[in-house]
Amino acid sequence: MTRGIAAAGVHVPRFRIEASTISEAWGVDHASGIERKALPAADEDTVTMAISAAIDALARTDVSPEALDFVGLATTTPPLAEEEFAPRVVRALGGASGTRTTTATASPLAGVDVLERAIEADGPALAIAADAPTGDPAEADHRLGAAAVAFLVDDDAPVTLVDSAAHADEYPGVRYRERGAEAVDALGVTTYERDAVGESIAAVLETLTADELVGAALHQPNGGLPYRVGGRTDLTNDAIERGTVVDRVGDAGAATVPLGLCAALAAADADDATVAIDFGGGGAAIGLAFAGGLDNAPAVDERLSGGETVSYVRYLRERGYVVDGEVAGGGAHVSLPSWSRSLDGRYRLVAGQCPSCGGLTFPAEGACGVCHDRGSFERVELPRNGVVDAVTVIGQGGAPPEFVPQQERDGPYAVGIVRFTCNSEEVTIPMQLTDCDPETVAVGDEVRATIRRVYADEGIPRYGSKAAPI
Amino acid sequence: MREAYVIGAGQSPFGSYPEETYRSLFETAYERALDSVDGDLSPDRIDEAFLGTLGVGGRQIGLSGPAVTEHVGLHGVPTTRVENACAASGYALRNAVSAVKSGMADLVLAGGYEVMTDTSADQTKWWLGVSGETEWERLSGTTFAGVYAQMASAYLNEYDATPDDLSRVAVKNHANGAENPNAHLGFTCSLEDATAAPAVADPLTLYHCCPTTDGASAALVASEEVARELSDVPVRITGSGAASGAVGLFQRDSLTSIPATVTAAERAYEQAGIEAGDVDFAEVHDCFAIAELLAYEDLGLCERGEAPRLLREGVTDPDGDLPVNTSGGLKSKGHPIGATGTGQVVEAFEQLRGHGHVQVDGAERGLTHNVGGSGGGVTVHIFERGFGGESA
């Protein structure tokens, strides 16, 4: 049995901010060891980031979404405080309804936890960690980032799980969030916190059976902690550096250690050993020891060095720190049952092909949009790349009320009519543009459908495809 | 077949009248329509009423039609509220024509009303968006300005047209509206004003968009027998064409044409026995400047891509070969959704009787073109001065 990690995918939001920008704004540095970090755009959340990372991972293998037996989603910042989100991810990917799912949200440890659960499961499995924690803008926020990582776990994998270990002791107040609160917090009892993390991780490492470790992704809420914690062990700074990403992405909650693991595995050779050890506030730690290197993985360093750097004002807006998100006057209402009927179209661009004339109709309902016959459509998934046939920019004041909160955060947006071609038939879909300067989108531009948050109706977030310029 | 005639038509002033109600605005339009009848008309001769409205801002979703007719004393008259978004009263007129032509009625009131300016900005946007295709088009982030802006972007990309051509619609229609005491925005504007105005939805600027307006309009549609009794110079409705189209722009074959306009126009021309362009003037649905350009082409007034030339050469100016929107159009006169279709009839009625605020010389035949949403429902009507048909 050589079950382990067969591939990995990553989503780092395109927006980045330099830590110095934040420390200059506040006149104090609360982001020790962090140079820059990522932040989600207004239409991204942990569900969309998870979907994006999962698509990135699956694209590196020949495993189809329908073949997945298990999908685990880890995040400390789910879009709703209580709800299972893995089923949304499964549906968006086109997975089977028999897929076993789990959603873990209690602490950053959730990322390593779902990875172990995916390895313990049978068949092709996805372990996804997606997180974008928020905190007091005056302090905790300075170091908080965002990222998503997906590991495809399968039998006969190049990276195998060699051992796992856990440690539990009561350490409250190290990292916690009060019931009903948005902001992650810590009491700031420095020595106590450092000992809690250090002892827990050292205890796990001692128990793990592994060869000499060339890579270690350790709990990394800031840039210094993994090295201080590592100092209590035999780990080399080189090994820790391979698994440390917090300096470039920020503390991405449950996704930070998995992202560090991804980077370390991608740098490892076939006979190298790598560990991932994370700590969850409250006092639990889990460690996983792997053997092997991962070719089917993105270049994490490249993903972390790219992006678009934003100002601090833009940062506060995008993150929603200064926007309440209330929809004034009532937004467009689409009942949940109606919305559910449309999910295949929204996520996977499923159109209807007319049995009479072969023409495409989107959405796949009603009479054929081309010949107007009423046959039963053959459902076809459109390619995700299309061409802009018409486009406008909706400025502030021009958006429907349900898009005002997004606009307050992200500014004007472009809305286009995008033409998709499938089996030499064409069909058009109205799509909001994302991940771009709206003023630069022009008729004829090539775009790719990506899943983003559309809006929230009756408090329930709704997701669908938007178009990102290629 | 029986003929149908407009023997009276009137409108309230279009504008912002928060102190008025939809009933009081309609009362003004109704009284003016009665006053415009040449003979002595007793309102109790009205057999039926068809009244268009989108939803009067949600304040009376159901039965606003009877609320209006009862308000003006048309007690007991069967009243149907017609809803086809901005084409509501174009369709109300069509229903009135059908009722008269079928012989079910001899005198029918067609009209419309809307109150839009006393609601908050957010509520207004909500209402303006509910007539588009909601589940996909609206939820891509558009209201109507955005959808028409998409048409404009496709048009400017496909043809030799510029934002100045859009502005020429505004300049012309504001110049006409400045002469119309009932116009909402009765002022003139320059090409520079229009092009340099703030963008609403690129490439459409503020001056390329009609206002939201309070107002009402009414027309009295009569059989030939009644018209002969009550009117010296009636206006015969020689063609009533209508067509539906996909509600969402993305669901149509073309982004630079409104197919329902093409079909409605063909039907109206055929019924009237005329060819496109055989009209002396037209009131077209210019909710956004691009809509007037598309209307020229969809109505067959010029070839595809030729609309900018008509504007540049002044063909559609009041002294051109084919004046368009002498009332000021939706752009300047205003666009009280449900009242717009029969508001256009008021202009046609006055032009053909020689009372236009901007009078077209020798006007004998006119056209009105009313579009619901971005093209989900369209009516085209042809009007001719004087008696004809049955007795001709």
Image (cartoon, helix red, strand yellow):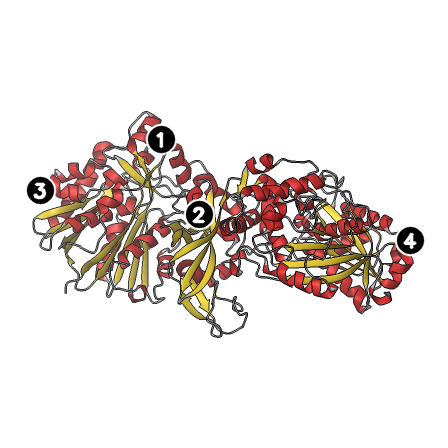
Q: Which residue is mark 4?
A: B39
Q: What is the spatial separation of the Cα atoms under label 1 and label 4, in whole angstroms? A: 79 Å
Q: What is the spatial separation of the Cα atoms under label 3 and label 1, in whole angstroms? A: 36 Å
Residue depth check, mark 1 versus mark 2: number of the one nearer the observer: 2
Disc 1, SS: loop
* Residue drawn 35% across the image and 40% down it: A134
User: Image height check: is B180 above or below A86?
Assistant: above
Q: Are marks 4 and 3 in contact (CB under 8 Å)?
A: no
Q: Which percent across, then down, holds residue B7? A: 84, 55
Question: Residue type at mark 1?
Answer: Ala
Q: Is residue A215 visible?
A: yes
Q: Are marks 2 and 4 in contact (CB under 8 Å)?
A: no
* Residue drawn 76% across the image and 51% down it: B348
Q: What is the spatial separation of the Cα atoms under label 2 and label 3, in whole angstroms? A: 57 Å
Q: Is residue B118 visible?
A: no
Between B300 and B213, the one nearer to me in the picture = B300
Q: Chain of mark 4?
A: B
Question: Residue type at mark 3?
Answer: Asp
Q: Which residue is mark 1?
A: A138
Q: Which residue is mark 3?
A: A234
Q: What is the spatial separation of the Cα atoms under label 4 and label 3, in whole angstroms? A: 107 Å
Q: Residues within 10 Å of mark 2 (few under 14, many from 20)?
A: many
Specify whether disc 2 shares its chain with disc 4.
Answer: no
User: Image height check: is A180 above or below A349?
Assistant: above
Disc 4, SS: loop
Q: Chain of mark 1?
A: A
Q: Which residue is mark 2?
A: A442
Q: Is B60 placed left or right of A264 in the picture? A: right
Disc 2, SS: loop
